[in-house]
Image (tube, rainbow, N blue to C red):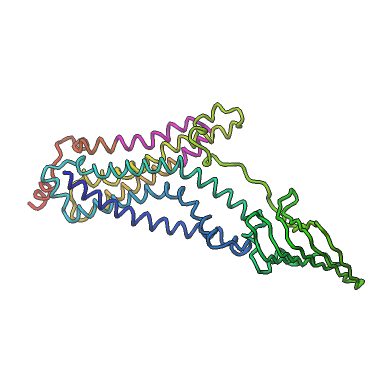
Amino acid sequence: MKKLNVYIFRQIVIGFLLVSFSLMSIIWLSQSLRFLDLIVSKGISAGIFVKLTSLLMPRIFTILAPIALFASVLFVYNRMLIDQELVVMKSAGISPWQLAKAVVLCGAILAILNVYIMNIGIPKAEAKFKELEWRVKNNITQMMFREGEFTKIQDNLTVFISKHDDDGTVKGIIINDERSPKTKSTTSAEKGLMVQTDQGPRIILINGSRQEVGIRKNTFSSVSFSQYSVDFGLQGSRKRGKDSARTHSFEELITALSNPTLSKEDRYKWFTEANRRITTPLLALVYALIACTGLLISNFNRRGQTKTIGTAIASIVIIQAIDLVSGNQSAKHLPFLLIMYANVLLPISVCITLLLKPDILNGRPFRSTLNVMGETNA
């Protein structure tokens, strides 16, 4: 029996890795399209772009992993049924529950992995993602200014920087400003420092000079300075957004109802997120059991298992829909948490009961597929 479980377990894991990798690749590409404008407008490097999009993957993995496991289990057991491997196993007296042990193990391992990801991986990734996204969108740093290149900030404002230092300062600065219809100016400085203000980003220049040409009066003026400030005139959100519930630890979320610093809406959202970190990992076990239960307790059909597979797919669609609806509603009305828990615990109980007592549906002892095939041929 151990060799049999290892054989099934290995087939499921291989299928899961292939399906999950394919789905994750597709989703990663689709998510990457959201940040293409950052490459064009901000000029971020490929490394920053990959890091930014990769930080979304832990959350996406917890959503796609149960679906990938469902597809893998469904494929493996359906293939074993078509190849009549399950026929031989059942005729040898192996019960459906024994054949499902590998599935239970896979579902349990993935559920534990998702618990770790949702409680440790996702909070860290979400915090890093928000910080990096804010820096890219709102800060004027080396992600926007490249060494030795002229960077066009606006239609009439161009900046050149020779070098970035590790302490955040820049050296060899030239700024050509033609935003005013009356004058044109060119400012150069030995070094400068990028800062954020309530009015937007600006640069503090140190030890430089400023030449200005009057367009209408054809005048010229030049002035040297030890310190000078240039406003880039960029508008937009300058403050970091409020942290979402996903960035907080499980302990903070589960005790949110007694947190006086939170509003009623936030308390409900945080408490719901804490319960989702319990129920969502269990979906891996739910989907895996649904995928194998129908194929293991049903009789062999030469025409295929279309009806059984269709029922399994419809079941996970319904469960996923209930999970989304109950999760959204429980953030407003906590009694919906009962539906969220019932949505995972009830299918697990039903599947395990059917696997342990496959004759419960027809009220008579479970017949092996081999006998049924013999009766059909006769």
* Picture layout, residue 243 above or below residue 133: above
Residue at figure coordinates x 37%, y 47% from the top left: 66
| Residue under the point 16% across and 53% down | 84
Residue 343 lies in the magenta stretch: yes
Can you give x and y, in whole percent of width and height, for residue 1 in the image? 16, 44
Q: Residue furthest right?
A: 217
Camera-nearest residue between 276 and 233: 233
What residue sits 45% from the left and 32% below the top? 337
Q: Relative to the observer, which residue lies in front, 25 or 299? A: 25
Residue 175 position (above or below residue 246):
below
Type of secondary structure dominating the magenta stretch: helix
Q: How many labels does the image show?
A: 0
Asked if 330 appears above or below 196 in the picture, the reply is above
Image position, residue 16 (x, y; %)? 32, 52
* Residue 103 is a magenta residue: no
Residue furthest to the bottom in view is 218
Judge from the rendering whether residue 112 lies leftward or rightward of residue 127; answer left or right.
left
In the image, 305: left or right of 204? left
Res. 38 image quadrant:
bottom right
**295 relative to 276, above or below:** below
Q: Position of residue 248 (x, y in %)?
A: 53, 38
Is 77 left, or right, of 342 in this rendering? left
Left or right: 134, with 117 as reference point: right
Span colored in magenta: 324-349
Where is residue 101, by image quadrant?
top left
* Residue 276 coordinates in the image, percent (x, y): 45, 38
